[in-house]
Image: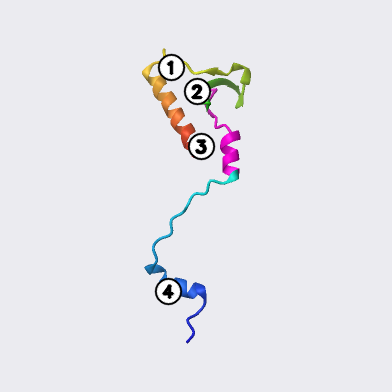
């Protein structure tokens, strides 16, 4: 009695098998990227990023970050619209790190 190759048997019985779930591997390279790569978002000639749980902003010149202009974002005197903009930027930065 010949049943066929492994792939033939799998294709005939795959409807009875539970769907495979993808397991996300936390590899050495992912660990290296999370430790050494910084996500930056540029909007309106300003670059925004988070480092050590501090929100930073810096001026840009033709897409290049001017590092000497980097400063912490002060939200204490911001308008509601500016706060909403900062929250949007933080959400996007967080998405890019996942």
Say how the picture is coloured: rainbow
Secondary element type, mark 3: loop
Task: Count residues near mark 1 (Cα–Cα under 10 Å), then give few for <14, some for 14-19, many for 20+.
Answer: few
Q: CA distance from mark 1 to mark 3?
A: 23 Å
Decide which of tag 1 and tag 3 comes sooner along the chain.
1
Secondary element type, mark 2: strand
Decide which of tag 2 and tag 4 comes sooner along the chain.
4
Residue 66: horizontal and vertical position, in percent?
Answer: 62, 21
- The residue tagged 4 is 12
Q: CA distance from mark 2 to mark 4?
A: 55 Å
- The residue tagged 1 is 75
Residue furthest to the bottom:
1
User: Does the CB distance between marks 3 and 4 fall below 8 Å?
Assistant: no
Residue 70: horizontal and vertical position, in percent?
Answer: 58, 19
Is residue 62 something that shows in the picture?
Answer: no
- The residue tagged 2 is 55
User: Does the CB distance between marks 1 and 4 fall below 8 Å?
Assistant: no
Q: CA distance from mark 1 to mark 4?
A: 61 Å
| Closest to the observer, 60 or 90 | 90
User: Does the CB distance between marks 2 and 3 fall below 8 Å?
Assistant: no
Q: Which mark is residue 97?
A: 3
Identity of the residue drawn at 60% across and 39% down: 32
Secondary element type, mark 1: loop
Q: Which mark is residue 4?
A: none
Magenta residue check for 63: no
């Amino acid at each position: 009695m010949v049943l066929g190759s492994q792939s033939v048997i799998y294709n005939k019985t795959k409807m009875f098998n539970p769907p495979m779930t993808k397991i996300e591997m936390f590899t050495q390279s992912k660990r290296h990227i999370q430790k050494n790569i910084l996500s930056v978002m540029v909007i309106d000639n300003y670059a925004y990023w988070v480092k050590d749980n501090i929100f930073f902003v810096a001026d840009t010149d033709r897409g290049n970050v001017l590092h000497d202009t980097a400063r912490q974002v002060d939200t204490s005197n911001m308008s509601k619209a500016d706060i909403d903009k900062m929250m949007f930027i933080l959400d996007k930065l967080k998405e890019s790190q996942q």
